[in-house]
């Protein structure tokens, strides 16, 4: 058995690092099979040499997050440990800095992974961004946050959110109401994100003024959208013709963000996904950026990552 000592200047950091009932440190101890003991402003790590080295890197990464004003939680602790295993813990510095926007409840919206930071930077610096990856990576949520930021800064006059109304087992004809009421359930995730960012009252006010539009993809045909931030969600369910139609709606002073998960295509058998085709055709076009998320960028429950890994493993065996 070996041991190593980390000196901490700020005792408040020690309290935050250990967490309530030492829950943060217990994650580190379990992951690396070490014992972590705090004595005054010293942290002692006891275990095998290789395990100690990893635990020390993880703890130093978390201390750097605390120094930059971030709070520790189960998600970013596990993410830091993932980066340590990949020898990429230095990338955590990219997660510090200003938030994208503040929600109606006062909660700051920030990228939680390196992949999410690259995504928001790409949206800032490119006219068209394709955000592709598994569920729970924040593709739509962060795109809406960036749209709200651009709208508040008066860089755009409108936010337009759209998605194809493709059935995933249900039939539109069996749903009650007129066409708008039939497609509203498909647009609900976009409404939810905007409600959280703006609050229901502000959302309704902007929608009545025409500053915010949430509509199915079919409503985009024949339009030219100037000074707008346009988000196409669930784009894996577009056909190549629909994708081309949508991308050519781009007007002056506008941005487009296309999001989707190419492993969850609900199109009829034999139909090609417009998103998959667009990724191949547009990958070398200037001012268009393709951002690919991985399971490491999942910020939902830990089991979501495990589910994605299990499905990927099953798919690779099938191939």
Image (tube, grey):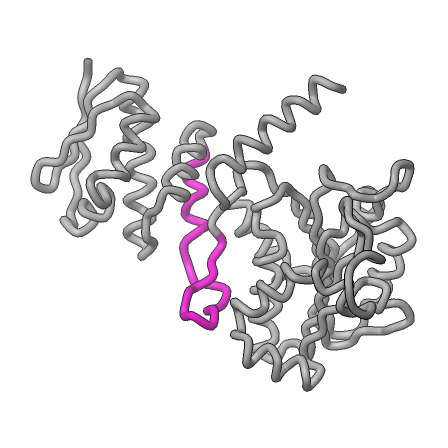
Indicate whether residue 103 is drawn in magenta: yes
Residue at 58%, 64% in the rendered image:
192
Quarter of the image with the C terminus in it: top right
Residue at 23%, 48% in the rendered image:
16
| Residue 250 image point, x, y percent | 81, 67
Total labels drawn: 0
| Residue 53 image point, x, y percent | 30, 24
Quarter of the image with the N terminus in it: top left
- Residue 221 visible in the snapshot: yes
| Residue 312 image point, x, y percent | 65, 27
The image shows residue 188, relative to residue 154, as above or below, that is above
Image check: 25 left or right of 9? right
Q: Residue furthest top?
A: 1
Q: Residue furthest left?
A: 40
Indicate whether residue 92 is drawn in magenta: yes
Image check: 46 left or right of 162? left
Q: Nearer the viewer, residue 306 or 76?
A: 306
Residue at 57%, 32% in the rendered image:
307
| Residue 272 image point, x, y percent | 88, 41
Q: Nearer the viewer, residue 48 or 286?
A: 48
The image shows residue 317, relative to residue 234, as above or below, that is above
Residue at 72%, 37% in the rendered image:
263
The image shows residue 140, relative to residue 160, as above or below, that is above
What's drawn in magenta, residue-wise?
A: 88-111
- Residue 284 visible in the snapshot: no
The image shows residue 27, relative to residue 275, as above or below, that is above
The answer to which quarter of the image holds residue 247 is: bottom right
Image check: 75 left or right of 200? left
């Amino acid at each position: 058995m070996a041991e190593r000592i980390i000196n901490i200047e700020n005792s408040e950091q020690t309290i935050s690092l250990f967490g309530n009932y030492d829950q943060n440190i217990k994650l580190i101890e379990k992951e690396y099979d070490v014992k972590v003991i705090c004595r005054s402003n010293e942290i002692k790590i006891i275990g095998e040499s290789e395990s100690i080295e990893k635990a020390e890197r993880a703890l130093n990464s978390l201390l750097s997050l605390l120094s930059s004003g971030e709070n520790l939680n189960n998600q970013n602790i596990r993410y830091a440990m993932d980066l340590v295993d990949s020898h990429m813990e230095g990338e955590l510095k990219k997660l510090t800095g200003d938030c994208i926007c503040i929600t109606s409840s006062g909660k700051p919206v920030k990228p939680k992974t390196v992949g999410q930071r690259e995504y928001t930077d790409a949206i800032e610096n490119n006219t068209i961004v394709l955000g592709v990856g598994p569920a729970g990576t924040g593709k739509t949520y962060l795109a809406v946050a960036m749209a709200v930021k651009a709208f508040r800064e008066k860089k755009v006059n409108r936010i337009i959110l759209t998605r194809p109304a493709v059935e995933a087992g249900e039939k539109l004809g069996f749903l009650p109401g007129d066409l708008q009421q039939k497609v509203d359930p498909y647009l609900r995730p976009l409404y939810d994100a905007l409600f959280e960012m703006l609050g229901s009252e502000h959302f309704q006010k902007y929608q009545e003024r025409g500053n915010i539009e949430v509509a199915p993809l079919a409503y985009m045909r024949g339009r030219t959208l100037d000074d707008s931030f346009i988000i196409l969600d669930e784009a894996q369910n577009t056909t190549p013709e629909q994708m081309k139609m949508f991308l050519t709606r781009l007007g002056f002073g506008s941005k487009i963000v296309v999001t989707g998960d190419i492993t969850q295509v609900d199109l009829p058998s034999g139909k090609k996904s417009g998103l998959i085709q667009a990724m191949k055709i547009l990958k070398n076009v200037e001012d268009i950026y393709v951002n690919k998320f991985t399971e490491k960028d999942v910020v939902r429950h830990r089991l979501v990552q495990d589910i994605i890994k299990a499905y990927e493993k099953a798919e690779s065996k099938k191939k």
